[in-house]
Image (cartoon, helix red, strand yellow):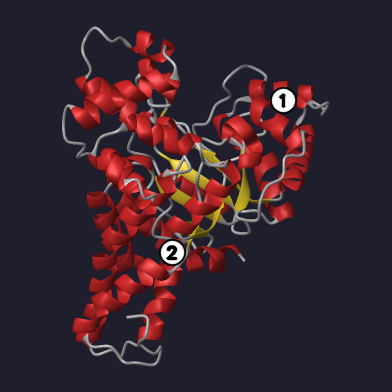
Amino acid sequence: MAGIEDSKVLGEDEIHAVVKAAMDSSPVIDLHTHLFPASHGELMLWGIDALLTYHYLVSEYFQVAPASVTHEDFFKMSKVEQATLVWDELFVKRLPVSEAQIGVVTTLTALGLEHMVKAKDLVSIRKWFAEQDPEEYVEKVLKLANVQYLVMTNIPFDPTEASKWDAGCKVPATFKAALRIDPLLKGDWGTICTCLKEKNFPETLEGCKDYLRAWAKRMNVIYLMASTPADFRYGAGDVAKEAGWPTATELIDKVMVPIAEELQLPLAMKLGAWRSMAPSLDCCGGGDGLVLSDLRPLVELCRRNPKVKFLATVLSRGNQHELCVVSQKFRNLHIYGCWWYCNNPSIIDETTRIRMEMLGTAFTAQHSDARVLDQLIYKWAHARRVMTPAIALQFQLLIQAGWTVTAGEVRRDVWRLLGGSFEEFMW
C-alpha cells in the first residue's frame, strides 16, 4: 500500500489496508518509558534474563510456582536462577499464552532467534544476548520497534540515578528526559529535604524550586512527571503528612506550578497506582496494584492552572471514559497511552475506540511504559496490530457518512495518533 499516492481517494474497502500500512511504517514517539541508554550502565535493563524477571512474569510465575518456593527464597537467587525458574514454569511446562509471555516470544522471534525459541533453548538465547554490544543493541531495538525517540523517567531523588548525571553520562538524541517529582505530589517533605541537603540547597520551598531548576537544566527535560499516590488530594481535604510539613497542594502551587510556568514544562500525571499492595513482590517492582482514581484533583489542577499543560493517563479501565470527558473540557490536557495493567490487547482496543469516538485524533494512542529495552519490540508490534482495526473503523464510518478520505489524510492522522498529536500539544 506504500505505492498509493497521497491524493488517492479511498473506498471503504481500502481503508483497513492503508491504515495497516501506515501503522506498520510510521515511527512512534514513545512518550513514557523507564528506559536508560547504555551510558547509564546497570540502569539499562536488557536481555533475556531481564525480560524473564520483569515483574509481570515474576507475578505470573508465583501463580503456578511450587509452594516450596517462597518469595524470600526466590529473591535471594541470582537473576539467572530466577529467569531459569520463570522460563521452566511459564514457557516449558505450559504454553506461554499471557500477553507478557507472548511478548517474550514476539521479541525473540523479531530478533531472529526463532530457531532457539522453537527449541526452547534458553542457554543458546542467553549466549546470543551475551555477545551483543549494548550501544549497538540499543540502535537495533529502536529500529525494530520503529521508535523515533523515547522519553525516559528520570528521578533526581534517587541517588544511583543522580550519580550517573553527576558523572556526566552522555544521552543520545533518541532518549529524552522527563523529571519525575513524585515526592511533591505525595507531600513527602522529608525525602525532599534529604535531597536538598545532599546537594547543598536550602531546605525551603525556594530551595526546592532551585533544585528542580538545576535538574531540569542538567537533564534537558521535556516535561515534569509524577505517579500520584492512591489517596491523592489537591485542594480541599489535603493535609500535611507530618506536623510542620507543607501539604502536597502547597508544594504543587508554590513549587511545581511556578517552575512549570517559568520553564514552560508540562506535567505528566499517572493516576491510579496502589503502591505496595502485595509487599512480598516489591523486590521486583511487582507489588503494586490499582485503584479507581478520583479524577477531581486532575480537573482542579487543569482549572486552576490554565497556563500549565497537563498530560494524563489512568491505570484503571474504569476511569478511561471519564478521562475522555475531562479531556474534552480542558484544552490544557492531553491524554495518552494504555498504562501498565491497561496495556493488554482487549483494553487497548476498547480504549482506542472510546477515545477516537470522543476525541478524534486529539490524543496519543499508546506508550510502552517499558522498563526493559527489549520490551519496545513486542509492545509496539502488539499495539500496532490491535489499534489498526479500531482506527480503521472510524475512517470507514466517516466514508459511510459521506466524507472524502484520501490516503495522505489517513497517513497524516495515523502519525498523529502515534506521536504527532503529542508534539502538536507540547510545542
Q: Which residue is mark 2?
A: 418
Residue at 53% in and 47% down:
137
Where, by quadrant of the figure, is residue 388 drawn?
bottom left
| Left or right of residue 119: residue 360 | right
Query: Residue 64 location, x and y as percent?
Result: 20, 21
Residue located at (43% from left, 55% from top): 336
Q: Residue at x 48, y 43 (%)?
A: 373
Residue in front for this viewpoint, 420 or 134? 134
Q: Is residue 349 left or right of residue 197?
A: left
- Mark 1 or mark 2, which is nearer to you? 2
Instruction: Inspect this view and state whether residue 311 appears.
Output: no
Callout count? 2
Q: In terms of sequence position, does the residue under pointer 1 or pointer 2 come before the other? A: 1
Q: Is residue 67 left or right of residue 422?
A: left
Residue at (29, 69) in percent of width and height: 391
Q: Which residue is mark 1?
A: 195
Relative to 257, say whether 335 is above or below: below
What's the amino acid at mark 1?
Cys
Helix, strand or loop at mark 1? helix
Q: Which circle marks residue 36 in the picture?
A: none
Q: Quadrant of residue 396?
A: bottom left
Locate the N terminus and report the quarter of the image it occupies: bottom left
> How packed is label 1: few (under 14 Cα within 10 Å), some, or many (20 or more)?
some
Image coords of residue 338 (percent x, y): 36, 50
